[in-house]
Amino acid sequence: MSDTIQLLPDHVANQIAAGEVIQRPASVIKELIENSIDAGADDIHIILKDAGKTLIKVVDNGCGMSPTDARICFERHATSKLKSAEDLFNICTKGFRGEALASIAAIAEVELLTRRAIDEVGTRILMRGSKVELQEPVQTSVGSVLSVNNLFYNVPARRKFLKSNSTEIKHIVNEIQRVALAHSDISFKIKHNDTLILQLDAANIRQRLVNLFGKGINSQLIDINVDTSMAKIKGYVCKPEHSKKTFGEQFFFVNGRFMKHPYFHKAVTLAYDQLLSKDQIPSYFIFFEVDPSAIDVNIHPTKTEIKFEDEPAIWQIIQASIRESLGKFNIVPSIDFDTDGIIDIPVPTTEKDIAAPQIEVNPFFNPFEEEKRERSSFQSSMGQGSGYKKPDAGLSNWGSMYEGIDNIEPVEQQAEYKEQATTTNIKSSMAQVSQSDVEFNEETLQKKYLQIKGKYIATPVKSGLMLIDQHRAHTRILYDKFVANSNGGSGHSQLSMFPKKVELNLLDYQLILSMAEELAALGFEISDLGSNTISLNSYPAECEDIDATEIIQTILLDFKEGALDIKEYITDRLYLSLARTAAIKYGKALDVREMRQIVDELFVSTIPNMTPDNKGIIHIVSLDDLAEMFN
């Protein structure tokens, strides 16, 4: 019987390793940028085509490589960062595994141009599927230029699962943000399809934050700075009013390396205890400087998870330092013991007797004296007594609410309703409802609609009492209009007399621009003003009363939570988020005509009983249920 275990060929092993290290174009960019930083570069250019699917080019002014180093860097486990196993416990550089370039070369076509300052000519290498196709001398500038073409060309299954360009750009910008924050002394320039999307000059940390997240964040930053024997912690946290409902502005860095640490994140959120609601997340940018031997960065292939030697102690330091910083800026309530005057605190003595406090009481007070001549409405209705005083004029017509109630006939069917509305099944215990259930008689219109607590519309139907959630009903109405407008080609747009400028952070700015065409189909006209700022020039007529900033933030919030491709998103979450934003809010008083219009338009929908996200709109209280209540 032949042996069944065999060694994998190198190119297969490299492809398997690429599955751990290279997940998408953003992973390639992260690895290449980190190599450039380790090479001492202070100016890095990134050029992209089709969100990195067609081309990723990273140009740096680092130290460059010799011809031999340029060839061997594509081998597995080839690294200049480690000499022995002990070096794993004293890592100060970004890349050290020696897997990145080997993994990239296994699933793409790679070209490398590199030269050292001491060399007269550089080296050019072409690789395809882990195989060296060409190595030759070439004239090039000092540093390295590494081009990655046709990512996953030989792994079609992986390429098929790449998302749309807008989604991939979102991940790329996210990775660049992390590296740019950790190295504010390095300048970055990013171009996508020959368009400059980001340019960051070397600056301090605060200025880098402003460049990435907008000028508005500058006034929200609170400095933290603590130095202990275990760790030095510095950076910024943001004021509570800057908090958001989604993640995106939460950053931890240790020794210049971005990391994810849920345990430390909990320390930050607890420092904001009683300052934020449960659905809000504080923004923070915290940098740790610790002894490399006190952390382990080799616990995850992407090196974003790091283990600390004494995490509980650092947890306490984080929380205490943030609480202290919030207290200095009077964000956290504190007791001030420094007073200009002297507080007079009485001290008991034995020189005189302390009398009990006296309470003056009028024993002849009768709270019912002024109402002796009045009788309750119940006594009056029973005909008891003749001294009943008529209520104030404002309540004199209360009885008219019930006039004619005995003359109301059962509602009869008046018109045949659309087939799709009458065939809609209402979920759970809700009965089937059609427009014929509702009587639209002008004489009794006032009695047919009643608003309850600014939230529900109540109207009688043949089977009993129908309750409609006004916000959800209007959401369904607007959602159907947005979908219909999209299918028709374009939405009904309302031109703004005073276009609204909206300043965003870098990631949100790129997301909105990537959705410009889809938003135009809804009636939004967006202009790019540069510097992470857009102008909202027009909007759907249904959104006339909604603030532009609220509209944009709602779209971004739903897109981040949905994590969908834009084509799928545009038919669902985008319309839904707009409908929610523009729909009438709870607490808004409606007159009878407005309530009738909502009911009319609701029952034109093919699914009047459910919102687009499957929440109930209508509830029927049947006559039997009403009778049961009084048994």
Image (cartoon, rainbow, N blue to C red):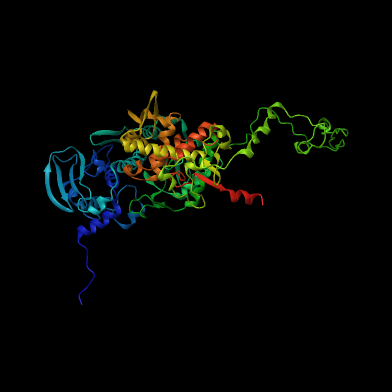
Q: Position of residue 466 (x, y in %)?
A: 54, 43
- Report x, y in % for residue 471: 49, 38
Residue 438 falls left or right of residue 2: right
Is 212 situated left or right of 19 in this image?
right
Instruction: Specify the quadrant that holds the N terminus.
Output: bottom left
**Residue 322 rendering spot, x and y as whole percentages:** 51, 40
Indicate whether 199 appears above or below 84.
above
Residue at position x 39%, y 45% from top? 562
User: Measured from the top left, where is residue 244 in percent x and y?
Assistant: 46, 39
Say whether residue 224 is visible. Answer: no
Q: What is the residue that sits farthest to the top in this orientation?
A: 497
How many labels, in total? 0
Q: Is residue 446 visible?
A: yes
Q: Quadrant of residue 458?
A: top right
Q: Is residue 618 toward the left or the right of residue 16 in the image?
A: right
Q: Say which of 235 and 46 sits in front.
A: 46
